[in-house]
Image (cartoon, rainbow, N blue to C red):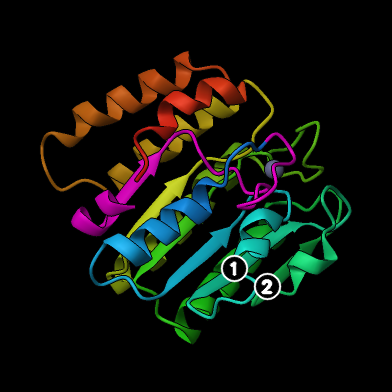
Amino acid sequence: GKLAMDRGWAINVGGGFHHCSSDKGGGFCAYADITLAIKFLFERVEGVARATIIDLDAHQGNGHERDFLEDRRVYIMDVYNRHIYPGDGYAKRAIKRKVELEWGTEDMEYLQKVELHSEGALNEIRPDIIIYNAGTDILDGDPLGGLAISPQGIIKRDEIIFRAARRRGIPILMVTSGGYQKKTARIIADSILNLHRQGLIGEEHRISKSIQFILYGKEHFSFCVPQKKDNFMGLE
Ligand SMILES: [Zn+2]
């Protein structure tokens, strides 16, 4: 979070445990990293009074929603498959911009909705930081997500969100959240390289080296949640 504030963007290749709230775990999520990151920023980092969560994992992000239900400083946009876990009606009341998808939603419809609503959300309220929960369980064939987005669709989606943030000069912190196929590691790597190619991340020369490190890390960490913990330590 603080890294994003300092240099405009940050990516944590682990993290995004969006079913966990401050007082309760759930859905493979043992700690509420999104809530922690936002509370840390509000309390410890100057210049952060408002945050927007853009949650594009295939599942509803009921953890952070429950945590910020009564908190008007946090604007939540959530795009998810309406028929799968967790279907948390209580938490849904925290969502300012709710986009519910049907089984098997494909690229064209998905990307149109993502672009329309992310622009709408950021025009409605300008936050001091965007927390982007970039789950790859929207990928076609995911055993849990139930959507049908192509690898190119995921790369385009990430580009849409980074472009919206960077154009407005709003710092963005991306976390990679759910994704239950082995090939998502490669897609995340390709997406980060695309962001770099598009000039949306990285101004210094050092950046290509740190991207290589990120890629190396992602390929070599499995998707098992306890191992993700190592990555989490990098998140503030
Ligand atoms: Zn998910």
Q: Secondary structure at mark 2?
A: loop
Q: Nearer the viewer, residue 6 or 198?
A: 6
Label placed on residue 94: 2
Q: Amino acid at mark 2?
A: Ala
201 vs 39, left or right, is: left
Residue 149 in the image, given as x and y percentages of width and height: 69, 45
Residue type at mark 1?
Phe
Give residue 13's position: percent from left, percent from top.
44, 34
Residue at the image point whose x is 71% and y is 57% from the top: 62
- Residues shaded magenta: 1-28
Dot 1 corresponds to which residue?
Answer: 68
Q: Position of residue 12 (x, y in %)?
A: 40, 39
Labelled pair 2, 1 in contact (Cβ < 8 Å):
yes
User: Which residue is nearer to you in this view: 85 or 115?
Assistant: 85
Question: Residue visible at 52% across and 32% down?
Answer: 187
Callout 1 environment at 10 Å: few (<14), some (14 to 19), or many (20+)? some
Residue found at the far front of this picture: 23
Determine if the magenta segment contains residue 140.
Answer: no
93 lies left or right of 112: right
Q: Is residue 199 visible?
A: no
For the residue pair 8 and 141, the one nearer the viewer reads as 8
